[in-house]
Image (cartoon, rainbow, N blue to C red):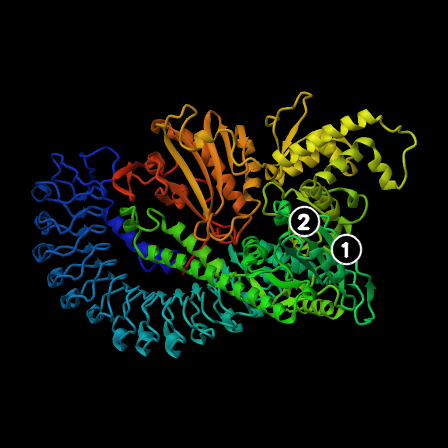
Amino acid sequence: MAGTDSGNLKTVRLWRDAALRARKLRSNLRQLTLSAAGGCPGTDQLDSPDAPLLVLPANIGDIEVLNLGNNGLEEVPDGLGSALGSLRVLVLRRNRFARLPPAVAELGHHLTELDVSHNRLTVLSAEVVSALRELRKLNLSHNQLPALPAQLGALIHLEELDVSFNRLAHLPDSLSCLSRLRAVDVDHNQLTAFPWQLLQLAALEELDVSSNRLRGLPEDISALRALKILWLSGTELGTLPSGFCELASLESLMLDNNGLQALPAQFSRLQRLKMLNLSSNLLQEFPAALLPLAGLEELYLSRNQLTSVPSLISGLGRLLTLWLDNNRIRYLPDSIVELTGLEELVLQGNQIAVLPDNFGQLSRVGLWKIKDNPLIQPPYEVCMKGIPYIAAYQKELAHSQPAVQPRLKLLLMGYKAAGKTLLRHCLTEDRVEGNQGGEDKKSHPPSPPPVSKGIEVTSWTADASRGLRFIVYDLAGDDSYEVIQPFFLSPGALYVLVVNLATYEPLRFPTTVGSFLHRVGARVPHAVVCIVGTHADLCGEQELEEKCLDIHRQIALQEKHDAEGLSRLAQVVDEALARDFELRSASPHAAYYGVSDKNLRRRKAHFQYLLNHRLQILSPVLPVSCRDPRQLQRLRDKLLSVAEHREIFPNLHRVLPRSWQVLEELHFQPPQAQRLWLSWWDSARLGLQAGLTEDRLQSALSYLHESGKLLYFEDSPALKEHVFHNLSRLIDILNVFFQRDPSLLLHKLLLGTSGEGEAESRGESSPLMAPPAPSQDALRATQLHHYVEGFLLHGLLPAHVIRLLLKPHIQAQQDLQLLLELLEKMGLCYCLNKAKGKPLNGSTAWYKFPCYVQNEVPHAEAWINGTNLAGQSFVAEQLQIEYSFPFTFPPSLFARYSVQINSHVVHRSDGKLQIFAYRGKVPVVVSYRPAKGVLQPDTLSIASHASLPNIWTAWQAITPLVEELNVLLQEWPGLHYTVHILCSKCLKRGSPNPHAFPGELLSQPRPEGVAEIICPKNGSERVNVALVYPPTPTVISPCSKKNVGEKHRNQ
């Protein structure tokens, strides 16, 4: 009823009470609801150009409540006034009335309630209004009224008036005569001052003047002493007059989004206040006038500038809801734990590092939000689990010796040949390439730079005196590793982007710098990134300065471009939210046509999240030469200073329970240390040995994951049952498949077949194995070379060849099977010829690695182009869901997605950019189209087709694939993308630019009474609603993110 900012507050209970009172009055009345009989069945009456026909049944003289809503009426049925002599309540909402029907005047002598909301009224007839003298409730909301007639003052019995969402610039003077008015709603109009007429209404109990530019309140507002509910959201008040504090009956007060910097000292007189919303103001200090309000139950102070909370807040003993999110609060008072009745506590988006002891006393808190705080104690992982976990952690910490483990995960990223591997060696081994200046360091003669062996992980004790260690991940820069790199990107790490300054040119910024920043930001929002330029010794002094400045300048431009783009998109959402849902749904031309307020708020929250969690890019670019010991030392000092900066990495200094340290030690002790990975239950058993119960294990594992000691993907449905503690072996196995070196692969296979691999690893030869005959050796090499070619061109490998490649890691057939299952769960490969749940019956299992597929399109490209194999155009209707990625497309997404959908499809044919398959007997096509220019985004689409009567089969085919993609995209919380349903009519015409309906409609039920939707690209063409809305809404909203997908309220 009020502005959108307040739509979700529990205080709507108070407004709902009024509606319930009205229903009780009607509960014993004889009621009749009529629907239009004319027009096409199921068509949208509001969009239909022909006014529907509605006929009154006979013998309705005793009807007291008549509902003609949602019928698209422009006039009421003939004889309405004369036929309904007992009518008391008339509902005409959601029709097309441009004026009040004259027949309404005939009912005036007995009509007590009239609802004409959601119509097209531009004027009210004075004659009709003056005839409604018995009216007690009048609803004119959501129309286009610029003014109200003076005759409104003649309705002396009026108790409730709703004129919200109109175009009123003022109210008629006669309104002041309505002495019985108890509830008035004028929100979302064009008032520029508080209406003086309202000050005369002494009986007024409920008033909503939200979303009008009042810019202040009159001092004599104190005349409204009966007011219990007052909503003033978004009215640009600035300050409150002292007379405001005389409204002693107030129980519910909305003052959000008003630019308030303080409250009057007398505000504490409002002793009956139960709900107060002061969100989105400019309060820098917690208002002291709130502390004496002992009856307060709900308090909202979100999005202000508060830095602290007073200890006297414990005096608000009846408080049930406390929202303090998105402020600048650094600590909470110990006394906050005395608010034991709290049910909602929202603290996200502050600067809180430590929670008070005994926080577990707040055991009744059900809604708990704490993310986006630099939490040290308890650790972030514990706090995110909820109050019970915090209580258990604090209890354990009180009875054990805490252990401090300063350890930080450091990731070296960059384009191929950027110098990451050499830089890692020089940093971690404290070495210098070459001998310069007689420095007292371990120096080495010039030698070829170390060759990358793929992804590598090293432990580096950067400061022995403080025990500070980096777990250094060297992420290979070759494109073939892009599919596995994201598994190693995690929050709480320091990212070092390495750029080869010797080869850098401004035109190469997008590939050498920009794309990496986009990738990290999409995977780990708000990550800390340091830019290091290598090979500085190969550049002149001026050249070095110019290149570093260019990188810095282009980073700033890219960040500005992205932020401005997101701000523009957020503004479009705000504009859509400002329009009523009914208005958005009335025209397909409207932005976010048909999208619910809930989905719009979710999208707005995501845009806000992306804007608030930009990358933390440290400047300036740091040039370094691995031949210069001073520059290397400067880089070490820089990394140490960044790591120890408490505002950048507050978690580095957190205090941990002894049990967490014991758990870490147990994971790396025999016999489990030798295993490739542990199941979650294996870790749970180790947790019990360490004194950790099962429900607290996850927090400890999350900490070990973020600090780089192991990998634990708690948010991945496929991988959360595994704990990867043996990182070196796991990385060795992954490197085997992604080095893309044919000679190396062939060498591994030859070693595997001859048994030389084992002998070589022991440093001995096998005297029992006779050398193979030359002809056999040549034949074997030819066959293995064929397998290598097939792998690099088509991504195909049989299981026995995979076993040869992994021979050092495979001890038994069971080990191979477990490894292959793991690779499938990671989305790296799938079995081609094994039906789900069925054995192979002795035949060879073949596995496909989609990232190696080289052919551009599958064999069925004729269908994809809109024709069948005979060259005839389809007569079937096409369904196509398109995902668009304007900033960056995760490089591994299409390859991993092609694995994830394998369990849903059969008879598939894969190309590098497309997949043709069947789901049952229904064809589906998944297509990836890379961007061809700066203005054209990458797109990924999922398509199918069927005849219109059987279109449900196409939905049934593509819906599971859409949901699989939505789940996969949850791994990229900082990724911006949009989803659209392409117009089937446009696709059938072959339009190069088909109209796109909002993807949010996929998660919404089909609107009732709507059969067709106009395609805005061709106003005369209508699209069947079954081609836009699925029969059943998708489980996950296409554009929701896990960090903002939870219940979100904008107060």
Q: Can you give x and y, in whole percent of width and height, for residue 185 in the image?
A: 25, 60
| Residue located at (33% from left, 46% from top) | 594
Q: Is residue 454 visible?
A: yes
| Residue located at (72% from left, 57% from top) | 471
* Residue depth check, mark 2 versus mark 1: number of the one nearer the observer: 1
| Figure check: 980 above or below 472 | above
Q: Can you give x and y, in whole percent of width and height, for residue 1041 in the image?
A: 49, 50
- SS at circle 2: loop
| Residue located at (49% from left, 70% from top) | 315
| Figure check: 671 above or below 283 | above
The answer to which quarter of the image holds residue 394 is bottom right
Q: Is residue 376 visible?
A: no
| Figure check: 758 above or below 1050 | above
Give the position of the C terminus as an image quadrant.
bottom left
Name the one closer to the observer, 905 or 579: 905
| Residue located at (73% from left, 57% from top) | 422
Name the one closer to the observer, 64 or 278: 278
Q: Can you give x and y, in whole percent of width and height, for residue 937 in the image?
A: 45, 49
Q: Can you give x and y, in whole percent of width and height, for residue 561 in the image?
A: 46, 61
**Left or right of 772 in this view: 180:** left
- SS at circle 1: loop
Name the one closer to the observer, 550 or 215: 550
Q: Amino acid at mark 2?
A: Leu
Give the position of the N terminus as an image quadrant.
bottom left
Seen from this angle, which residue lies furthest top? 841
Seen from this angle, which residue lies furthest right? 767
Alpha carbon distance from label 2 to label 1: 33 Å
Q: Badge 1: few (under 14), some or many (20 or more) residues near its Cα, within 10 Å?
A: few
What residue is disc 2 on? 711
Q: Amino acid at mark 1?
A: Pro
What residue is disc 1 on? 448
